[in-house]
Amino acid sequence: AAAAAAAAAAPREYLPVPPVARKGHQSSPVWNYLKRFAPANQKGHNIECFVMVRGSDGIQHPCGCTLKWGGPSSGTTNLLTHLKKHPEEHQECLHASRHSSVGKELKLGGTPSTAGKQRDAGRDAGRDAGLDDPDEEDDNDDDNDNDDDGADEGLITMSQLQHQAVFPAAEAFRGGARMRGKIINDPVHGHMYFPRIVVAAIDTPQMQRLRELKQLGTAYYVFPGAAHNRFEHSLGTAHLATNVYEALTRTSGKGVRKVLDRNDMTSVQLAGLCHDLGHGPFSHVFDNEFLPRRVPNWDAKNPPWNHEAMSADMFAWMVEDNNLDLDAEVTRTVKKLITSDDAGVPRGKKFLWDIVANKRNSVDVDKFEYLMRDAHNCGVKASVDISRLVSFMKVIGDEICFKASEVYNVYELFHTRASLHQMVYTHKAAKAVEYMVVDALTEADIVWDNQISKAIWDVKDFIKLDDTILKRIEWSEEPAMQRARDIVRRIRTRDLYQYVNEYAVPEDDIKHFKPVSEADVTACQGDNGIPGGLKPEDIVVQNLKIDYAMKDKNPVDSVKFYQDYQDTTSFHVDKHKVSVLLPSNFLERKVRVFSKSRDPLYTEAVEAAFSAHQRKMYRTEQQLTPARKRPRGQLGE
């Protein structure tokens, strides 16, 4: 008895699946749904079922029933018998097995027997009538040991996570004409399952608009693979939000689960899906570059408009406009999750605000998703292992914490983000296109009587804005739109603003850095042969800031960790205890200059003025490369 108790208390280790089959035999298809573990539990069971089922609380989770198996010599009859509780998976096993009558008929090129068809028809009819729903958990099943403290309180393993991510096909395909859910195949996440209410939200004009918004804005003009849109990013975020929610409910114990209800999961899923509804044309270009030019009295430190608040407003309109079957409380919760507003959150539920838009430390599924998708589509290697981060999450003190062994992986999350900013998001050619797009939008907004900039105040006007606005400008016929059309024409013919040079702000000057303006650079020009000299409107100065998502602070200082699976307390990890190779600074600033004209007369004048500006500020040139003399007539890079 003591030995059995000790075995039950030991961490459960999942063994390779499928097990080695007997010589001349193929592995049974039951191993698609069952996993072996060691040591056996107190009942002597050593097999666990991972078929996804919906419990009485409405939450999808693995079945968790355990079985006893004697090894390859004992066969899999009792295991297949258990799968009868999950008719869809049971039938799939019969179809895949060469030993079953159904499998033999299929292998010979036939179809399942009439009796088999009648069983299938009867089962489907019973489902349509609402009978014998395989997704309803049997609370009286003696084999279900999900309530054992050891299983519930233990850390989720990679194999468990893998099975949790598998879509519940039984729910997706049953129900006849009733819409039950949808499975979407994605190049980053594979098969993603979305329940009925999420599918209803996806199939709305507000959500479908995101198909016309490039995730990376003008980076697509440099990285041809960066053709993905906000739409697929939003689907992926909802998918990861679901996985993280389910993982946390499993790893964090009954204390966390008992305060949750079925509306919480729905709220998290919809927040992940709808968190980007408020993005304007070319995503961050719109609110970071265009609106400050066109909205009167725009305060960059306290802007009167942001895409998060607009996302919440668009979601509320989506619910009303499409008559979505959502409780008013769910709608309010989703809006607060999107805007990271955790004021008045009930005790025990604050960790839900860490999943989609985490204002504590910026570790959330939105970041997970865009790093995975952007790196994948741009062909850039990411150093962070996001699957491990999700695997080793746990709620302690109403906050998502990570296993201490993953601290370096958390640093890699922010390092990957900074690397993508350096290599992709702020690529000099992408920024050149970005400034041209902003100039074109500005010219159009003036001609169209502020139609673009005023649209941010009304969701019904805002929904009309997307990346196709560049086409509207390009093919407009108003004579007053000629300047805007000319800029778009330059983009189409790759006649981009000329990148001239850049310099990194010295470390000691970062804290008190004052942004450099175009006038600051042109004021340092010498005799350059340009009639009237360089004017501020001839150049663009970019004040570039790249950080670890929390300005000059180390975001990992705001992340909490735990050591052992059963820990109920968390702690911070000092950076110096992790590695001496970690960065000492978490913010860098650079200053770049572009010439709107590619004429060497202008580019050389800009380069000379930029060098003089640096000497004035720092007594020496700080720029990345020495000033270059370009032959007359050369267009440059």
Image (cartoon, rainbow, N blue to C red):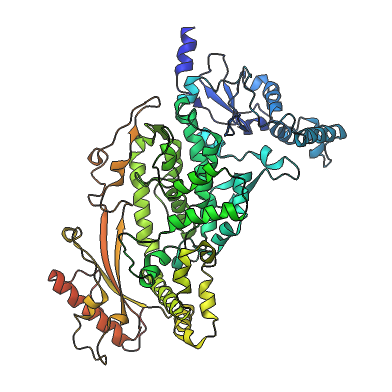
On the question of residue 630 being in view, the answer is no
Rendered position, 588 above or below 397: below
- Furthest toward the left, the residue is 619
Q: How many marks?
A: 0
Rendered position, 271 above or below 118: below
Could you say where residue 122 lies in the image, as x and y percent from the top left? 82, 33
Give whichever of 496, 56 is nearer the camera.
56
Q: Is residue 563 left or right of residue 180?
A: left
Q: Quadrant of residue 626?
A: bottom left
On the question of residue 97 being in view, the answer is yes
Give whichever of 455, 54 is nearer the camera.
455
Could you say where residue 118 lies in the image, as x and y percent from the top left? 85, 33
Rendered position, 34 above or below 219: above
Q: Check the picture and name the quadrant holding the C terminus.
A: bottom left
Image point 61% across, 40% down: which residue? 167
Q: Quadrant of residue 298?
A: bottom left
Q: Quadrant of residue 398?
A: top left
Could you say where residue 195 lies in the image, as x and y percent from the top left? 61, 43
